Amino acid sequence: MSAVPLLDSVWLVGSGTHPDALTDPHDCHCYLIWDGAGGLLVDTGTGLGTRRWLAAVAEVCDPRALTGAVLTHYHADHAGGAAAARAAGIPLLAGAETAEALATGDEVRTSLAVARTAGVYPDGYRLAPATVDRVLAGGDTIAAGGLRVEVVAAPGHCDGHLVLLLSTGGRTMLFSGDCLFAGGRVSIQALHDCRLDRYAETVIGLAGRDVDTLLPGHGPFVLDAARPDIQAAARSFRRLVPPPNVLQPD
Ligand SMILES: [Zn+2]
């Protein structure tokens, strides 16, 4: 396990599946953005592998030099490590819904309770409450070193989901959390706040952006020419048909 360089200024520092960045099998992909002067972490995993991703970040930079950790959404595989990140000196940045849910470790709103019952997380796993330092909204810009990261509201997979756009080195990268995946897949679950109409608006909006690189919260990356993947999902939603689901039935 170590920091896996993906592109100039971007590393994979945590994952539930990538063999070289494995932190805990329940973790999402956690990305580090660092330009030599400042940076951001994108998502914090469950908290079960925090020690490992902190060590991976430390291979690249001092974790306390980061502007913060952005939480794309409040699901435990992305935000469960938030409290531990903050305890390590990394400020937390998240949308209002995520901030509210994390303040109390709300396992109903975040769907952790039902996900644990469904066997997605270990029986004893709990969501550690965490205080968000900066509440983000769509249209905000986050400064990190010489980089400027755009925050885009992206509800649909769950309420309050955010994605990030970073243009640097001649390419635009989309850190898509659980909103969009390689092959134009989406993540649709039978949860209280998975909203297909909002999802459609989100994806159709993102298809209008000039994205080169898709860095999702799970599964393969699309390092180049990612726009057709996003447009395929948008095409499906325009026909009112949900795109292929990254989650498969048994
Ligand atoms: Zn999710």
Image (spheres, rainbow, N blue to C red):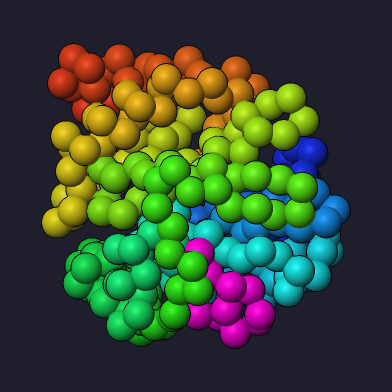
Magenta residues, start to end: 83-93
Q: Could you tell me residue 139's position as x and y percent?
A: 44, 43
Question: Magenta span has 128?
Answer: no
Say which residue appears at 58% left-offset and 64% top-offset.
Answer: 69
Q: Could you tell me residue 3's position as x and y percent?
A: 76, 56
Say which residue appears at 44% left-offset and 58% top-offset.
Answer: 136
Answer with the quarter of the image where residue 60 lies. bottom right
**Image label count:** 0
Of 153 and 29, which appears nearest the observer?
A: 153
Q: Quadrant of the C terminus?
A: top left
Would residue 238 be found to the left or right of residue 34 on screen?
A: left
Q: Is residue 27 visible?
A: no
When the figure is inspected, residue 74 is found, relative to residue 18, above or below; the finding is below
Of 202 and 219, which appears nearest the observer?
A: 202
Would residue 11 be found to the left or right of residue 233 on screen?
A: right
Of 146 and 160, which appears nearest the observer?
A: 146
Q: Could you tell me residue 12's position as x and y percent?
A: 67, 51
Q: Quadrant of the N terminus?
A: bottom right
Q: Could you tell me residue 102's position as x and y percent?
A: 36, 75
Would residue 136 be found to the left or right of residue 23 on screen?
A: left
Would residue 201 be found to the left or right of residue 6 on screen?
A: left
Say which residue appears at 62% left-offset and 38% top-offset.
Answer: 166
Say which residue appears at 62% left-offset and 59% top-offset.
Answer: 41
